[in-house]
Each structure stands twice: as C-alpha cells, then as structure tokens.
Amino acid sequence: MRISAKSDYAIRAMAELAGHYDAGAVKAEDIADAQDIPLNFLLGILRELRNGQLVRSVRGRDGGYMLSRPPAQIALADVIRVVDGPLANVRDLSLSQLSYPGPAEALRDVWMAVRGSLREVLENVSVGDLATGRLPKHVRQLAERHQAERL
C-alpha cells in the first residue's frame, strides 16, 4: 500500500487538531505552519474532512477548524477513507469480486490478509493516540519489530 501525501497531510492535520482539542478552533495557517503542509493543499484537505464530518469549521475572528468529535473516537482509517477512499483495493474492485486462475489462485487471500493487516493498525490507532504518542501496544510492537529487521 502506498500512503499518499494527501493522507499523510490529513492525518498530520488531524493530529494537530487533536493536540488543541480542548483549546478551541485552530486556523488553517497555524496547522500548515506547525506541520509544514502547503496551505492551499491543506485547505482542500480540510474541506474534505469537513464534508466527511471529521472536522467542523468555526467562523469569526477566533475561527478555524476543530475536530467534530473527541480525538479518541477518530481512527486513522477514518481519515484515510475520507480523503483517499478504501484502505486497500485491487484495480478498484471489491476483493470479493476477485478470482485468479491456476498458480495465482491464492492471491485473493493474500490481498485479503493485506487489507486485514492495514485495518488492524489503522482502525485501532486514533488521532488522539497519535497526538499523545501513546500508540496501542500491538502497534508499537509491530513498529519495533520492523525497526529491528531493518538494522
């Protein structure tokens, strides 16, 4: 799976908003500066996040953007689905629609396992977890195992 710049920026913006959850609205310019995201790109992402009901905008001098619900209730998977669609698909088909002949027959099961693995991480890490740095134990262990394999 390739994580798009759009998903990366959206998750970083959501983490920034989670970090300010109790402080009120955050201006798009402040999010862009804090996370080094191009402002025009961020504005489009924030519009999609608002349309997906993950953030809300506040007008006025003290306006900006806020999470629409508590950070612990917004999974990273929710953010990715809003800005980029399904977590994993093959040729824009549902995995249930796939079938392969002969020696490639088991490939559908591989794609299902990949999707399941992505969901296991992205649906169980919230923007609140990310903002506080307190990732679920199994996610931290996966990251540490991957780090050890790369050394």
Image (tube, helix red, strand yellow):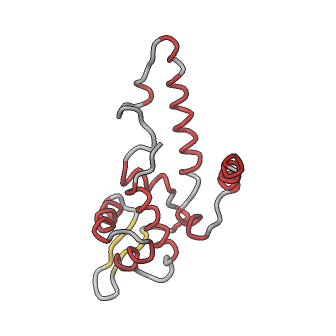
Q: Quadrant of residue 8?
A: bottom left
Q: Position of residue 114 (x, y in %)?
A: 54, 36
Residue that sits furthest to the bottom in the current view: 61
The residue at 44%/29% (across/down) is 95
Residue that sits furthest to the front in the current view: 151
Query: Which is nearer the eye, 31 or 150?
Result: 150
Q: Is residue 80 above or below residue 60?
A: above
Residue that sits furthest to the top in the current view: 102
Query: Which is nearer the eye, 70 or 126?
Result: 126
Count of numbered circles on the image:
0
The residue at 50%/17% (across/down) is 104
Q: Is residue 101 above or below residue 143?
A: above
Query: Which is nearer the eye, 53 or 134?
Result: 134
The residue at 41%/43% (across/down) is 86
The residue at 34%/78% (across/down) is 29
Q: Position of residue 67 (x, y in %)?
A: 43, 70
Query: Which is nearer the eye, 83 or 37?
Result: 37
Q: Position of residue 52 (x, y in %)?
A: 35, 58
Q: Position of residue 41 (x, y in %)?
A: 30, 65
Q: Is residue 8 above or below residue 132?
A: above
